[in-house]
Amino acid sequence: MEKINAVITGVGGYVPDYVLTNEELSRLVDTNDEWIMTRIGVKERRILNEEGLGTSYMARKAAKQLMQKTNSDPESIDCVIVSTTTPDYHFPSTASIIIDKLGLKNAYAFDLQAACCGFLYAMETAANMIQSGRHKKIIVVGADKMSSMVDYYDRATCPIFGDGAAACMFEATTEDVGVMDSILRTDGKGLPFLHMKAGGSVCPPSYFTVDNKMHYLYQEGRTVFKYAVSYMSDVTEEIAKRNGLNKDNINWIVPHQANLRIIDAVASRLEVPREQVMINIQRYGNTSAGTLPLCLWDYEKHLKKGDNLIFTAFGAGFTWGAVYVKWGYDGNK
Ligand code: UT7
């Protein structure tokens, strides 16, 4: 029997209209454009500020565009995976909400939570499901409404994050393209440094948790930065080595967009020049599970069939990893 590969056959995306600039942020907290640009690299971020709209709204828009671009019959979708840390509700899953809105009758759906690494883990999950031979077509969405848990009075975190969603179609192929290899890691040591204190089963919501601002994202930035640089660089180097990839045959690095200095450090370890690194942090900030597919959405037109892409991400947990993909088509769909 021929080997089945899982290939990305299209990309869809959505970012909200509202643009939150560094200038506006500097009116909320003691910060300025120069600090944010040199320490993080974010110029502006998008915010979903219409009342009553959550992550599923952006995820649905991205998935809808993906289905149009790939000319997909709703009946043909087997599964929808939404990677998110900011679901519409604790339950039901955000994926179950979009499945109804998109009219997908033959698909089942679930959310996958691996913080900023969510899309990486979901790619591996979808690839394995397809390689098993039991699924032919899977929509993988990375979506987060980070503004729903950012404290806009905390200057250490509010400049970093933004809202957005993007989705990829994963399909079965017998061609030598698609998800070729992956290294995924979790160590459980990251909890003290990156978390939300309340709202879960350990500390359910109460007047106390609200009064004490325990429903916001908490981050010890300097520690997280240190781990992000070393873990992402190590794993990217490891996956490159074991697949015979180096600066001469890597076409693109697709890094999580948390900090431009982290992105530069990872790329320089492999000596891949900036022009071959997907970067859009300046426009969207860190959209958590949204960053990797939003990069593909922006750079799709530059990609060619057979291009070697290394995806890498790092997030709460800690979770991190790298995935090697051989791209499956030329340019925009
Ligand atoms: O996606 C999940 C993974 N997350 C990440 O990868 C994020 C990793 N961490 C980071 O990207 C960086 O640590 C931050 C961007 C969060 C912070 O940058 P930093 O260079 O590590 O700054 P710092 O926290 O060490 O703070 C340096 C100084 C401090 O002042 P003092 O103590 O030196 O006087 C801060 O109070 O910068 C100050 N500061 C600010 N100044 C102006 C912190 N935030 C701001 C701000 N504007 N917004």
Image (spheres, grey):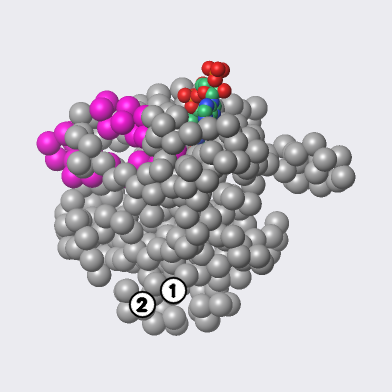
Tags 2 and 1 touching, CB below 8 Å: yes
Residue 168, horizontal then vertical, whole percent: 38, 62
| Residue at 86 percent of width and 40 percent of height | 208
| Mark 1 CB within 8 Å of ligand 1 | no
Q: Is residue 143 visible?
A: no
**Rendering coords of residue 94 (x, y %):** 60, 63
Occupied quadrant, residue 95: bottom right
Disc ID at residue 327:
none
Image coordinates for residue 44, horizontal then vertical, percent: 44, 47
Image-based side of 257 in relation to 59, left or right: left
User: Which residue bears the numbered disc 1?
Assistant: 64
Q: Residues within 10 Å of mark 1 (few under 14, many from 20)?
A: many
Q: Secondary structure at mark 1?
A: helix
Q: Amino acid at mark 2?
A: Gln
Find residue 265 and report its image quarter: top left
Residue 127 visible, this orientation: yes
How dense is the environment of label 2, judged by Cα within 10 Å: few (below 14), some, or many (20 and up)? Answer: few
Closer-to-camera residue (326/46): 46
Instruction: Please indicate whether residue 254 sits to the left or right of residue 176 in the image.
Output: right
Residues at marks 2 and 1, CA–CA distance in whole angstroms: 6 Å
Which part of the image, by quadrant, shows the N terminus?
bottom left
Q: Which residues are magenta?
A: 243-269
Furthest residue toward right: 207
Residue 80 x, y percent position in the rendering: 49, 66
Secondary structure beneath disc 2?
A: helix
Amino acid type, callout 1: Lys
Q: Which residue is mark 2?
A: 68
Residue drawn at x 20%, y 34% is 272
Q: How many marks?
A: 2
